[in-house]
Amino acid sequence: MIKIVRKLLLLATCLCSTAICFAQDTQPDMADVMRSNGKIYVVVAVCLTILIGLFIYVFLLDRKISRLEKNKE
């Protein structure tokens, strides 16, 4: 009986916290301002540059490790 009450209380808590989260105003004002100023493209370009750099680094690191493993044999 106590387990059922605990589960119901946990469920009620989760539902209430979810309702509180959805009750907030969810308009991304900063994104709208950056988009209207054209700065959002700068942010996207920087993020893409970082991601491409990380992919190149991982690719080169994989090649080096493969070369070392081949030389070890």
Image: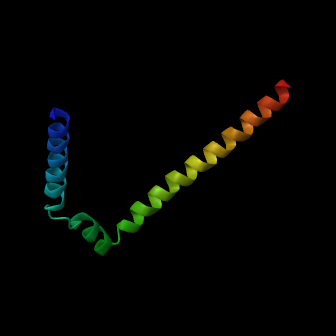
Q: Is residue 68 left or right of residue 40?
A: right
Q: Residue at x 56, y 54 (%)?
A: 52
The quadrant the C terminus occupies is top right
Relative depth, front residue between 65 and 12: 12
Which quarter of the picture shows residue 26? bottom left
Report x, y in % for residue 11.
19, 47
Q: What residue is shown at x 36% (from left), y 66% (from top)?
A: 40
What residue is at 73 percent from the left and 40 percent from the top? 63
Q: Position of residue 71 (x, y in %)?
A: 84, 28
Which quadrant holds residue 65? top right
Q: State left or right for residue 50 relative to residue 31.
A: right
Front residue of 50/14: it is 14
Q: Residue furthest bottom?
A: 36
* Residue lying at 16% horizontally and 44% vertically, measured from the top left: 8
Image location (x, y in percent) of residue 34: 29, 67
65 in relation to 16, above or below: above
Task: Indicate the position of residue 29 as horizontal and vertical percent values.
Answer: 21, 67
| Extreme residue in the top direction | 72
